[in-house]
Amino acid sequence: MTWISFPGLAATGCVRHGFSTREGGVSRGVYRSMDLSYTRGDDKAAVDENFRRFCAGIGIDPASLVSTQQTHTTRVIRVTEKDRGNGITKPQAYADVDGLVTNVPGLPLITYHADCVPLFFVDPARKAIGLAHSGWKGTAGRIGEETVKVMGREFGSRPEDMVAAVGPSICRKCYEVSKDVYAAFADRFSPEDMKAVFDRKENGKYQLDLWEANRRVLMEAGIRPENISVTGFCTHCHPDLLWSHRALGNARGSLAAFLCLTEGGEERSSHGI
């Protein structure tokens, strides 16, 4: 089994984290082999085993995972002990939430992905974490900035203390979008930022850089540039390793991002890439 991790997050010494790949699971058919979604038609027992294997690899409790029903919003909520197992071992208790934050050690957060950006946040000073799902709508709505604000409000976190990561998603050269997407960004991004994250094409469409857009959102929210890691893995470029909606359509599994606050100690790193 392999997963993708970020040295900058591991170096905080207070989290376990990882982003799954397609490798190391037991799912079959179009879901082969590491599928982490209960909603795409895969066998539940296979997904249960996939979660067990992945969580064992990074050293977290699969029964404690907290998930949400993602709908490309910018809503971020705080989760506590009562949310342990939400959407995994207990029925989903809330919807229209794309970001989760907590300061409870041993309460792992999870978001699902297949081209959209996972955003990881760690505040080693206040011992708090956040995880967000940022597709083009979430990025245009600046969910990364909203996550920073919620962590500040709930835990007293300061952006200058935070360490963040922009995780695997579809890259700029693979992500063609239409004028309506460009217009949505233009309402919330400066002209300088628009030039940096969009390339206009001869067919009237655009190539969008979600990695750079989210990096800029995080910097403008106050996170230091040197504390932001940006992935080098494109889901669309590597459909053999990563699930991609654009490359594979609906007949596919899902990736997941995991982040868990610990009581201390070094993070596991074997088989991480």
Image (tube, grey):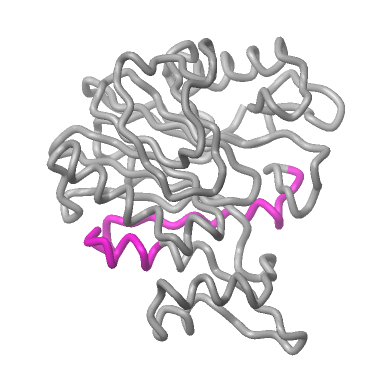
Q: Does residue 249 lie above or below 179 as drawn?
A: above
Residue 219 falls inside the magenta stretch = yes
Q: Position of residue 31 (x, y in %)?
A: 78, 29
* Residue under the point 58% across and 16% down: 53
Extreme residue toward the bottom, this view: 202
Q: Position of residue 126 (x, y in %)?
A: 14, 36
* Residue under the point 47% across and 30% down: 110
Q: Position of residue 127 (x, y in %)?
A: 19, 32
Instruction: Report whether 178 appears left or right of 219.
Output: right
Q: Quadrant of the N terminus?
A: top right
Image quarter of residue 61: top left
Instruction: Report whether 203 appears left or right of 208.
Output: right
Q: Nearer the viewer, residue 44 or 270?
A: 44
Extreme residue toward the right, this view: 29
- What count of labels does the image hold? 0
Q: Nearer the viewer, residue 45 or 205?
A: 205
Q: Does residue 181 lie above or below 85 as drawn?
A: below
Q: Which residues are magenta?
A: 215-240
Residue 3 falls inside the magenta stretch = no
* Residue under the point 29% across and 30% down: 102
* Residue under the point 18% across and 43% down: 153
Q: Position of residue 203 (x, y in %)?
A: 77, 85
